[in-house]
Image: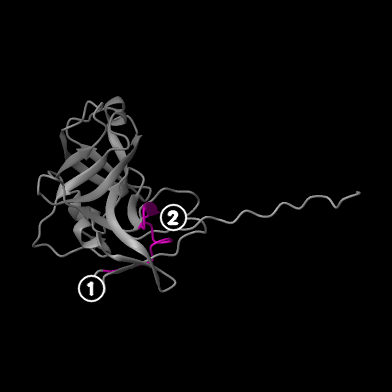
Amino acid sequence: MTQEDAAAGAARSAHGRHRTPGSGRTQLRVGRLLKAHGLKGAIKLELYTDDPDRRFTPGATFTLQVPETSPWHGKTVTVREFRWMNSHPVVFLEGVADRSTAEQLIKAILWIESDPAEPAEADAWYDHQLIGLDVQRDGKSVGHVIRVDHLPAQDILIVGDGDREVLVPFVKAIVPEVDVAAGRVVVTPPAGLFEEIAEEPETGEPDGV
């Protein structure tokens, strides 16, 4: 997943991410299906990989992350064609031949089996590499990563801070540095994320006015 700034309210993930599902297999999140494009089943993609032309070759098969109520729950999809249209990545999937079928897949996250032998993508980490890292703000520890939540819009670092948990969006603007070797994550959170914002004292009118 490429690093991107979280700008204009866009919910985009800025760091590449891997996860280790309960099955013991390791998978890589490579994209999210955004919206149907045209009438022939094409779907625009949000990419979470630095090498989409390699990931989305014809025949590539992805596991779907969709709600349990979705007719696609528990199924996989296979790439029929991948192309760029007006600078936007677009994918055609086998068995998805019209717009109505494509719309059933909107917001689905695509996962692929990760090959340990292949080179790691830039700014990509396994969950177990992140869990336990010291979270530092301005050179001081504010907690430790206790888990990573993978949401449709972006990933979230769950930071243990005493007896509470702080949800930190895993985006470049807030998490500018991950140093696994040094055992730390550097955060630049907005005010109020790790501490309560002091309320402004009320300024009443002077007596007798």
Q: Give the percent coordinates (x, y) of residue 51.
A: 23, 58
Q: Is residue 153 left or right of residue 20?
A: right
Percent of width and height locating residue 140: 40, 71
Q: On the image, numbered disc 1 is attached to which residue? A: 181
In-image side of 6 versus 16 (left or right): right
| SS at mark 1 in the image | loop
Q: Callout 2: helix, strand or loop?
A: loop
**Looking at the image, which residue is at 29% across and 44% down?**
32
Answer above or below: position of 159 versus 181.
Answer: above
Q: Is residue 23 visible?
A: yes
* Residue 136 percent location from the top left of the image: 38, 68
Identity, as a three-letter code, of the amino acid under mark 2 = Ala
**At which x and y percent is residue 148?**
28, 52
Residue appearing at x 38%, y 57% in the figure? 171
Q: Which residue is mark 2?
A: 6
Earlier along the polypeptide chain: callout 2 or callout 1?
2
| Residue 185 shown in magenta | no
Residue at 22 percent across and 56 percent down: it is: 127
Q: Quadrant of the N terminus?
A: bottom left
Camera-side residue: 29 or 88?
A: 29
- Quarter-wise, where is residue 75 in the image? top left
Question: Residue 162 magenta-drawn?
Answer: yes
- Give, as a single range, the part of the protein colored magenta: 161-179
Residue type, label 1: Ala
